[in-house]
Image: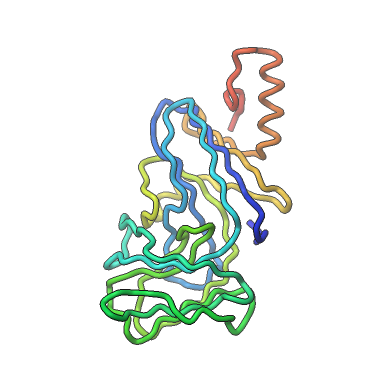
Amino acid sequence: MTNAGGTTFTLVCQNNSSQSGDFCVFQQDPSLGVTNAQSVAWLVEPAHPTTRVTFCWQASYDFAWSKTGKLAEGVVAASAQVWPADLETSNQVTLTYVGGAFTFENQVAGSAAGNLYLMQNGTIPADTAAAGIGMGGAATFLAQAEPNISMIFTPSPHIWLAFGDYTTGEVLGSEVLGHAVEIPYAPNVYSMAAILNADNTWTVDTTLALNKAFLLAQAEDSAARWGAEARS
C-alpha cells in the first residue's frame, strides 16, 4: 500500500462462512528495518455469518507506545500514547520515562525523509513497555522498549486480513499468516473487498468488481447475496 497522505482507504469484509468471529486487519512489512518489531491486530470487528463490516483508515503514520511488560505473542498492547507523524517534517520522536510514567517528547524532523525515527533515552526501564509506529491513530508494529536504543522504521506496509478470535492491539504470531490473506491495494485503488467463503477460503477483489459481479448475479437470481456467487 503506497503512502497516499490523507486519502481514505476502505476494506469491505463479508462473512459467508458458518462461523462467528472477528475480522482482523493487520500489516506486514519485510523492509520495515526494525528486525524485532512485531505486527499487532490493527483494526478488529466482530462478524456473525452473513454479516458485512467495513474498515476505513487514512494512510497517515503515528508513533505509539504501550505499557505491555515483556512483549510476546498474545500480549494486548492498548496504545497509551499516539502521536501523529509524517515522513518528512515530524518523523522523529523521543520516548522517555519521567515521574514514573512514559511519554513522548521532542518531536522534530529526522535526518532523512521517508524514515520514522523513534529514539529511546537512558531512562527506559527494561521489559516494561513496547514502542513503535501506527497508522490512522492505532499501533501497527511494536518492539520492546529498551534504553538508549534508536528504532529506524522505513515503512512500506502490506495489508493483510484474518478471521478468528482477536483483540485490537494483540501481538500476532507467525501462525496467523497461515489463514490470512493479503489485500493488494494497487496504485490508485482505495477500496477493496474480501469475502470469507462457505468453505473458509477467501475471495479478494476491488469493491467495484465485486459490486458488478453481484449485480450480474442478482439479474439472474433476485435472491442472490453479495459475494455468495464468488469463487476463490
- Marks counted in the figure total 0
- Is 74 placed left or right of 131 in the picture? left
Comparing 110 with 106, the one in front is 106
Q: Residue furthest right?
A: 188
Q: Quadrant of residue 110?
A: bottom right
Residue at the image position 42 percent from the left and 52 percent from the top: 41
Residue at the image position 71 percent from the left and 21 percent from the top: 216
> In the rendered view of the protein, which quadrant contains the N terminus?
bottom right
From the top left corner, tell me how far across and down residue 152 is, in percent. Answer: 51, 77
Whether residue 74 is situated above or below residue 145 in the rendered picture: above
Q: In which quarter of the image is residue 82?
A: bottom left
Residue at the image position 51 percent from the left and 36 percent from the top: 53
From the top left corner, tell me how far across and down residue 32 is, in percent. Answer: 53, 68
> In the rendered view of the protein, which quadrant contains the C terminus?
top right
Comparing 55 with 73, the one in front is 55
From the top left corner, tell me how far across and down residue 86 is, in percent. Answer: 60, 70
Comparing 209 with 59, the one in front is 59
Its colouring scheme is rainbow
Q: Residue furthest front?
A: 99
- Is 130 placed left or right of 111 in the picture? left
From the top left corner, tell me how far across and down residue 202 is, in percent. Answer: 54, 36
Residue at the image position 45 percent from the left and 45 percent from the top: 24
